[in-house]
Structure formats: structure tokens, C-alpha cells
Amino acid sequence: MTPTSVPGVFNQRGFTLVEILVVMLLMGIVAAAVVVNISPSDSQAVQIEASRLADMLEQTAEDAQDSGETIAWQGQGDSYAFWKKNDQGDWQEIADDNFYRSGNLGNDVGFGAIRVEGVILPPDQRLVFNPSGVNRPFVITLQKGAASASISSDAMNRMKVK
């Protein structure tokens, strides 16, 4: 065999394929670990959405008092909408307000039972927030998988997330 290069002189440039594959494998493992840690657990996701919705409903009750208008809320599946009465006294979905536009719960969380004064609210009914500030107590259950959380309100609109 004839040597192809001068002994002791290396003409190595760049990385070998094995080195590149090892680095890519390590980057993939690190990225997967980061994604797993960033995604909230089911119970965390439900708590996050329950807190967010409780804040929105508390603000809605305050806005009804401040504006002197009755505002309603309706939730079903994973979506919700806010409503006001029009000049004819019929409920009309609020579409022209950034805060009150229709929305969806995040993180694959959905609505469970919605109870008003202990009775399940039919899907075609709404939670009503009166200008007087005195409203019917309710409990809204949110769920994702086996995890759940509830938002409860008393007659004076104090929200509690459990």
C-alpha cells in the first residue's frame, strides 16, 4: 500500500458526519425537554383559564354597574360570548368591543357544568350581570381531562377559583 499523505500531516477540515449527528441528537433531546417543561399540566391549564375567566366575569359585573346596562355571558364547549340588550329588548352578541368579543378558552380547556343558584344553566341561557350589582350566585366548572376547577360567585360578585 502506498500512503496517500505525508506521515504526521493531517488535512482534516470540518466535522465528521458522526459528530454532526451526535450534536443534532443532543439538540433534539434538549428541545423536547424544554417543550415538556413549558407546556402546563392539565391541572395548571385549568387553573390558568379559571383565573382568567374569573377576572373577566368580575370586570363584566363592574362594567354593568358602571354603565347602567345589563350584560350577559354565555359559555359552551370551549367558547364564550358576551351579550347586551338592544333597543327592542332582545339579547344581541357584543361584537364591536375588544374586551367583550367572543373568545375561546385556551390550553384545550372546556366548560363543564354551569350552575346558577344550584341549577344547571341550559345551553340557550345566559349569566346575567345587572346594573344594580346584585346578581344570582353561580358556579362555572372548567375541565381538561381528569383535571377541573370551578369559579364561584356570590350575589355581590365576589369570584373565587377552586
Image (cartoon, helix red, strand yellow):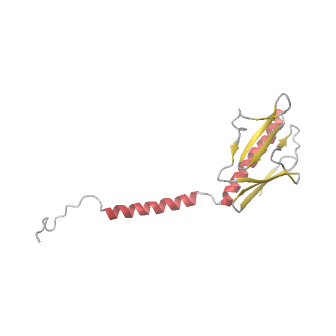
Position of 148 with respect to 153 (left or right) is left
Residue 17 drawn above or below residue 77? below
Q: Give the residue drawn at x 67%, y 58%.
A: 44
Residue 60 position, x and y percent, is: 78, 41
Residue 23 position, x and y percent, is: 39, 62
Location of residue 4 (image quadrant):
bottom left
Q: Give the residue drawn at x 70%, y 56%.
A: 46
Q: Which quarter of the rendering shows the C terminus?
A: bottom right
Give the residue at the far top of this rendering.
87
Q: Give the residue drawn at x 73%, y 59%.
A: 148
Residue 125 position, x and y percent, is: 83, 44
Q: How many marks?
A: 0
Q: Give the residue drawn at x 89%, y 43%.
A: 134
Q: Which quarter of the rendering shows the N terminus?
A: bottom left
Give the residue at the far bottom of this rendering.
1
Location of residue 96 (image quadrant):
top right
Closer to the camera in the image, 56 or 84: 84
Q: Is residue 153 visible?
A: no
Q: Is residue 27 visible?
A: yes
